[in-house]
Amino acid sequence: QVQFVESGGGLVQPGGSLRLSCTASGDSLKYYAIGWFRQAPGKLREGVFCISSSDESRYGVNSVKDRFTISRDNAKNTVYLQMNNLNPEDTARYYCATPLSSECDHADDEFGHWGQGTQVTVSS
């Protein structure tokens, strides 16, 4: 079954950028929609962005969609989340997951196969 490894997190100053990677193993990622989620301490997990596999449609939450970009490289079995103009409210652990469907139109609790996540900390 598909498994994900997230990477690319770190400590960045406000206004800075990071690119997160979500690399799949055990199956080809090209069949699946992939979502990025985040969870800050004491807060519920939040869906951030999703990219479909059918036509690479992209869906982002309002708080990030003008600053973050999601993309996929099926040849590398990897989905990326480019995050620009980061602010302290973006501090969280970021995860990727899939609904095992080609489309993003699934409730958050239908996403699974969570990786360990990668920590993003935005602080001066």
Image: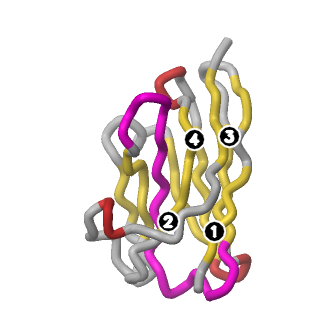
* Residue picked out by circle 2: 97
Compared across the picture, whether 13 is left or right of 49 comes to right
Between 61 and 56, the one nearer to me in the picture: 61
Q: Relative to 83, does residue 12 appear above or below in the rendering?
A: above
Question: Residue 55, position in %: x, y?
Answer: 41, 79
Q: Nearer the viewer, mark 3 or mark 4?
A: 4
Query: Which residues, given as a range, are shown in magenta?
Result: 24-44
The dot on residue 29 is none
Q: Please report whichever mark, 2 or 3, sits nearer to the chain's N-terminal start.
A: 3
Between 75 and 110, the one nearer to me in the picture: 110
Q: Secondary structure at mark 2?
A: strand
Q: Please report whichever mark, 1 or 3, sits nearer to the chain's N-terminal start.
A: 1
* Residue picked out by circle 1: 4
The dot on residue 93 is 4
Quadrant of the rendered image containing residue 64:
top left
Tags 3 and 4 touching, CB below 8 Å: no
Is residue 88 a member of the stretch shown in magenta? no
Q: Secondary structure at mark 3?
A: strand
What's under tag 2, amino acid-wise? Ala
Quarter of the figure that contains the C terminus: top right
Q: Nearer the viewer, mark 2 or mark 3?
A: 2
Q: Please report whichever mark, 3 or 4, sits nearer to the chain's N-terminal start.
A: 3
The extreme front residue here reads 42
Q: CA distance from mark 2 to mark 1?
A: 7 Å
What's under tag 1, amino acid-wise? Phe
Q: Please report whichever mark, 1 or 4, sits nearer to the chain's N-terminal start.
A: 1
* Residue picked out by circle 3: 18
Tags 2 and 1 touching, CB below 8 Å: yes
Is residue 41 a member of the stretch shown in magenta? yes
Quadrant of the rendered image containing residue 23:
bottom right
